Every structure is written in structure tokens, then in C-alpha cells.
Image (cartoon, rainbow, N blue to C red):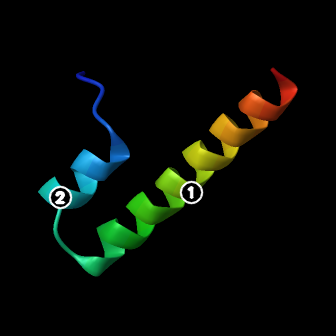
Amino acid sequence: MMRKSPAHFAEVVPGTRYRRLVEMIVAESNTLESLRRFSG
């Protein structure tokens, strides 16, 4: 299973239902990244 950026998924998978899911994933990963940046 190839790992791709969530943004890539948003372009590949059409539909609002998927897009909303992707947006949640992106927001979550951004939060994790900022938390990691703060703690590091």
C-alpha cells in the first residue's frame, strides 16, 4: 500500500462525502504535526 498525501486523495477521490473525510484527516494530521513541533 503506497503512502500518499491526503491532499492527493482529495484530488483523486471526488464527492463531498470523501472530501469531508479527507478534510478531517488533513486537519488531524496538521494538528499532530503542530503538536509535535511544539513538544520538539
Secondary element type, mark 1: helix
Q: Position of residue 3 (x, y in %)?
A: 30, 26
Q: Is residue 37 above or below residue 10?
A: above
Q: Position of residue 33 (x, y in %)?
A: 64, 36
**Most foreground residue, 18 or 10:** 10
Dot 2 surroundings within 10 Å: few (below 14), some, or many (20 or more)? few
The residue where tag 1 is placed is: 27
Secondary element type, mark 2: helix
C-beta proximity under 8 Å, tags 1 and 2 = no
Q: Position of residue 17 (x, y in %)?
A: 34, 75
Is 34 on the left or on the right of 11, as rendered? Answer: right
**Most foreground residue, 40 or 25:** 40
Is 15 on the left or on the right of 24, as rendered? Answer: left
The amino acid beneath tag 2 is: Glu
Is tag 1's residue or tag 2's residue first in the polypeptide sequence?
A: 2
Q: Residue 1 is drawn in which quadrant?
A: top left
Can you say which quadrant of the picture contains the C terminus?
top right
